[in-house]
Image (cartoon, rainbow, N blue to C red):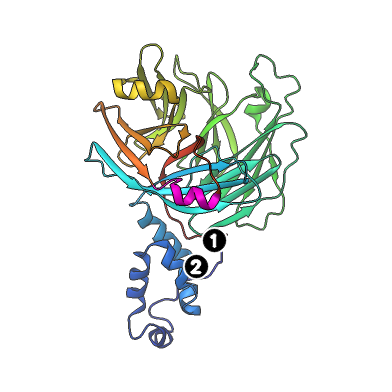
């Protein structure tokens, strides 16, 4: 991002007044920070002063802080025939309504290379990866930052985005290894960890060594959530990796008893600002379970929370396959279908496991007739990723 600074209201005041028609600069800053991202990006062309204001770190941070009070759902799917990935967003519905409808907005199309997105957005940024290519995209500005290629040499490659709140930096963690369901042996895993800092002068990936990983490497990697400068991801049936974005060190946390960290029926989410383990069983007991990590250093988990699945939810996801994608600002876990069918509205379920309340929202405006006609999208189902907590971010790298 450009390292320009906001002019002080007391500095160059005469120059600022001439460009703002006698409106005080601090009032201009306040007004601009309340506007949506789309007009702000256009207003960069008004003058050099406005460009400097909108691109400055102070203004970007102020805008992001206010955006976090208006979180959105991020929805994305790819169209294999055209090799495009479409990114939509929609406002999160009001939490006092048991049923509501929200309108989605098409924010961005990624062309030429169908990147895979496997993790939640972080401060409005999304990490994408496929093959040897890794990129970070900002759907708000439609900017894609392609990072230097990696060399997997036949290994599986995973990329996770994290934020360092100490140095205010975004970093991408890249893990390469020979993957496999059999984790009984560590022979020939050839596992390596690399880090890349966005917006820095770094030209290539930095290799990091971890004593914990060297002693006990892992074969599989599932999920991801970044909380307070730490990236958490499942690395087997009984462990969770904890990557410190600031120190770039990795340690392991033992998962709660009877929780499978790597499973299509389990997810790592946040709950009340803490790491939580979520799992469900719609084919057995028809219950959802959640544990909360109270102390990461002591690896202390809170008591298990159990919620019976409502009959409507159970019937819906028996056929569609459930996906829990995280937690929204109301401390509810969201449950969505993996499949997007253009013949029907996309449904999102919000589950408060404490109060045992489930509410539903339908997302309109995705793959409607006009959009399908323009992009040549058929009516059959597409695999969709739906994540809560997405925000608009006007930062450029």
Q: Is residue 167 visible?
A: no
Front-most of residues 277 and 108: 108
Left or right: 151 in relation to 66: right
Left or right: 70 in relation to 324: left
Left or right: 305 in relation to 54: left
Q: Are marks 1 and 2 in contact (CB under 8 Å)?
A: yes
Q: Main secondary structure of the magenta part?
A: helix
Q: Is residue 169 above or below residue 98?
A: below
Residue 329: x, y in percent?
A: 33, 42
Residue under label 2: 55
Q: For mark 2, give the secondary structure.
A: helix
The quadrant of the picture occupied by the N terminus is: bottom right
Q: Quadrant of residue 302?
A: top left
Q: Is residue 26 above or below residue 186?
A: below
User: What is the spatial separation of the Cα atoms under label 1 and label 2, in whole angstroms?
Assistant: 8 Å
The quadrant of the picture occupied by the C terminus is: bottom right
Residue 124: x, y in percent?
A: 47, 50
Residue under label 1: 396
**N-terminal label among 1 and 2:** 2
């Amino acid at each position: 991002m450009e390292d320009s600074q906001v002019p002080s209201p007391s500095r160059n005041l005469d120059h600022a007044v001439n460009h703002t028609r006698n409106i005080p600069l601090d009032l201009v800053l306040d007004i601009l920070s309340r506007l949506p991202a789309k007009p702000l990006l256009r207003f960069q062309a008004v003058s050099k002063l406005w460009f400097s204001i909108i691109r400055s770190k102070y203004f970007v941070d102020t805008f992001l802080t206010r955006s976090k009070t208006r979180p959105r759902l991020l929805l994305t799917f790819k169209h294999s025939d055209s090799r495009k990935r479409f990114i939509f967003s929609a406002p999160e519905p009001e939490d006092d309504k048991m049923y509501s409808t929200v309108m989605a907005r098409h924010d961005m199309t990624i062309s030429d290379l169908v990147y895979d997105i496997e993790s939640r957005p972080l401060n409005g940024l999304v990490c994408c990866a496929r093959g040897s290519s890794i990129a970070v995209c900002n759907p708000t500005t439609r900017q894609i930052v392609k990072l230097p290629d990696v060399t997997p040499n036949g290994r599986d490659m995973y990329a996770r985005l994290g934020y360092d709140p100490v140095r205010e930096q975004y970093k991408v963690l890249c893990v390469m290894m020979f993957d496999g369901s059999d984790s009984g042996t560590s022979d020939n895993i050839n596992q390596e960890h690399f880090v890349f800092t966005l917006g820095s002068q770094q030209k290539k990936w930095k290799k990091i060594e971890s004593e914990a990983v060297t002693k006990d490497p892992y074969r599989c990697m599932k999920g991801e959530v970044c909380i307070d400068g730490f990236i958490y991801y499942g690395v087997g049936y009984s462990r969770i990796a904890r990557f410190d974005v600031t120190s770039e060190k990795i340690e392991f946390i033992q998962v709660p008893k009877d929780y499978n960290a790597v499973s299509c029926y389990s997810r790592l989410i946040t709950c009340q600002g803490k790491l939580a383990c979520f799992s469900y069983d719609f084919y057995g007991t028809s219950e959802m379970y959640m544990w909360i990590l109270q102390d990461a250093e002591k690896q202390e988990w809170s008591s298990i929370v159990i919620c019976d699945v409502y009959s409507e939810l159970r019937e819906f996801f028996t056929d569609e396959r459930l996906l829990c994608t995280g937690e929204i600002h109301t401390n509810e876990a969201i449950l969505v279908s993996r499949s997007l069918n253009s013949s029907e509205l996309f449904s999102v379920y919000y589950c408060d496991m404490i109060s045992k309340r489930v509410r539903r929202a339908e997302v309109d405006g995705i793959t409607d007739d006009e959009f399908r006609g323009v992009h040549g999208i058929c009516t059959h189902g597409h695999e969709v990723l739906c994540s809560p907590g997405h925000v608009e971010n006007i930062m450029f790298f």
